[in-house]
Amino acid sequence: MPETVKVLFLDRDGTINEDTGSYVATRPQLKLIARAAEAVALARAAGFRIVIISNQAGIARGIATVEQVEDVNTYLNELLAEAGGSFDRCYYCPSHPQHPHPEYDRFAGCRKPETGMVERAIADFKAEGLTVDRDASFFIGDKLIDVECGLRASLHPILVRTGHNEEEICRRLGVVPEFVADDLYEAVTAHILR
């Protein structure tokens, strides 16, 4: 019988670290949002696997390289680990519909709000003998596309007001998150762990 796991799927920029308005391509550009690392640590302590799901179109746009994005993700995990949390897996989509690229266009189906990265994570867990319990899993992000991705993937979507805070857009378009939180810490402590 495969072991069942619950997963906290997290957007990166604007949810865990500050969204500076440009692509985070170097370690000094990565600044954690207050209490975000503690939130990840609390979720991990409560038994959640942590998975980052991030659109990184800066790669297709030539603003950041794959190596830079991967180094920033490594650094992010180091910062999270210092607070007692870390992520299990990290997926990013390098493509952008307005910036065709022969190498990255094949990943178009992974770009949020598409669920390609979530499904890949679930398949990778399955390859390890772990079944993801979608009913017990959450998707947290700061944009409409994050809420939509969570809904499409049959996860519990949560919108945070950090980053882009697209609460009004979600309301207007009828893409309704299960919970709206001021930040990742509130999402975890006031909703997920409650």
Image (cartoon, rainbow, N blue to C red):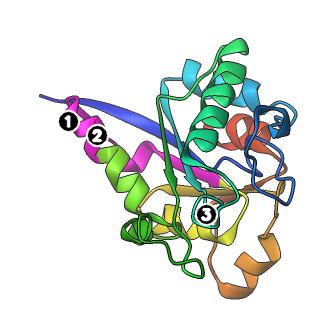
Q: CA distance from mark 2 to mark 1?
A: 5 Å
Q: Which residue is mark 2?
A: 124
**What residue did someone put label 1 on?**
127
User: Distance between the Cα atoms at labels 2 and 3?
Assistant: 23 Å
Residue kind at label 1, given as amino acid type: Ala
- Is the C-beta separation of discs 2 and 1 under 8 Å? yes
Image quadrant assignment for residue 124: top left
Please state which amino acid type lies under the numbered disc 3. Ala
Circle 3 is placed at which residue position? 57
Q: What is the secondary structure assignment of the residue under circle 3? A: loop
Question: Closer to the camera: disc 1 or disc 3?
Answer: 3
Picture quarter with the N terminus = top left
Quadrant hosting residue 148: bottom right
Distance, label 1 to label 3, CA atoms, is 28 Å
- Residue drawn at point x = 37 percent, y = 45 percent: 121
Across the whole image, how many numbered discs are drawn on residues? 3
Say which of 94 and 121 sits in front.
94
Residue in view at x 20 percent, y 35 percent: 127
User: What range is drawn magenta here?
Assistant: 123-140
Q: Eyeballing the image, is 117 above or below 82?
A: below
Residue contact at pointers 1 and 3, CB within 8 angstroms: no
